[in-house]
Image (spheres, helix red, strand yellow):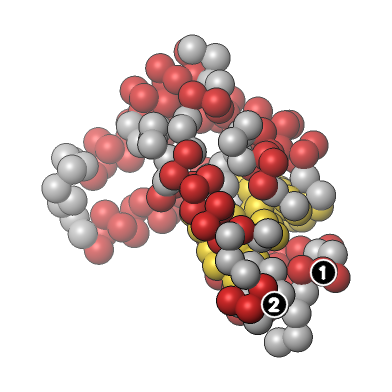
Amino acid sequence: MCQVIAVTGMMGSGKSTMIEHLQGMLVDCTALFEDDFNMAPLKSLPEIQAWWNRGGHVEELDLSPLVQQLQQHAAQSPAESSAGSPLVLLETQFGRLHPQLGPWIDFQCWIEVPSDIAFARKVGQLSRQFLNEPQPADSGNPLQWIAGFCDGYLNTTRQLFERQRQQLSQEADVVVDGQGDPFDVCDRVWQALPVSFKTAA
């Protein structure tokens, strides 16, 4: 069997940074990212809006490829993992709320960040990407894209953030404040992890 630590939080909360820091603290762990396996990605604003209008049901998103990857890790023998059991760090938007993922998650943390800070972080990230690559092939006019992103936030994404906060934080084993120094935030998660997840560095 494998042990799965799910890192959840809204867009811009610092999930990827948390995964990166935890990888440096845990021995013999693998990082998986839900977005890499989502077979029905909500990448465009119209897709997000249409999904939300249908009720925003997470079970619409097929995560079978991600579950298959988890099954592969679970099939590893203890000899294949120096920690005795394969350990997986999972960055996920939905965590235990998704019926395909829920049974796999042993420990779930929620990174709590105010919506305005999360939004500002994401817009800043997108802006820097556009500055480094002024005309991405699939984005059109960068300023027009960011304007649409802001409109989407006001119309839909903000509501999704609030649903995530209410539902995922209730499902979490630990809720941490994500506004501080990333190392301090990660340390709070580390302190909350059961001993069974920790190995000698």
The correct choice, above or below, for 100 with respect to 68 in the image is above
Residue 17 visible in the snapshot: no
Label 2, secondary structure: give it.
loop
Where residue 44 sits: x, y (%)? 33, 32
- Residue 17 placement: quadrant: bottom right
Residue extending furthest bottom? 201
Where residue 67 sits: x, y (%)? 53, 45
The correct choice, above or below, for 147 with respect to 30 in the image is above
- Residue 161 placement: quadrant: top right
Nearer-the-camera pick, 13 or 150: 13
Find the distance from the CA under tag 2 to the CA under tag 1.
10 Å
What amino acid type should be assigned to the residue bearing mark 1? Ser
- Specify whether 117 is left or right of 186: left
Q: Earlier in the sequence, mark 2 or mark 1?
A: 2
- Residue 27 placement: quadrant: bottom right
The disc label shown at residue 106, or none: none
Residue drawn at (63%, 31%) of the image: 99
The correct choice, above or below, for 80 with respect to 176 in the image is below
Residue drawn at (39%, 32%) of the image: 40
Nearer-the-camera pick, 125 or 82: 82
Label 1, secondary structure: give it.
helix
Residue drawn at (69%, 41%) of the image: 103
The residue beneath circle 1 is 196
What amino acid type should be assigned to the residue bearing mark 2? Ala
Residue 41 visible in the snapshot: yes
**Quadrant location of the C terminus in the rendered image:** bottom right
The residue beneath circle 2 is 83
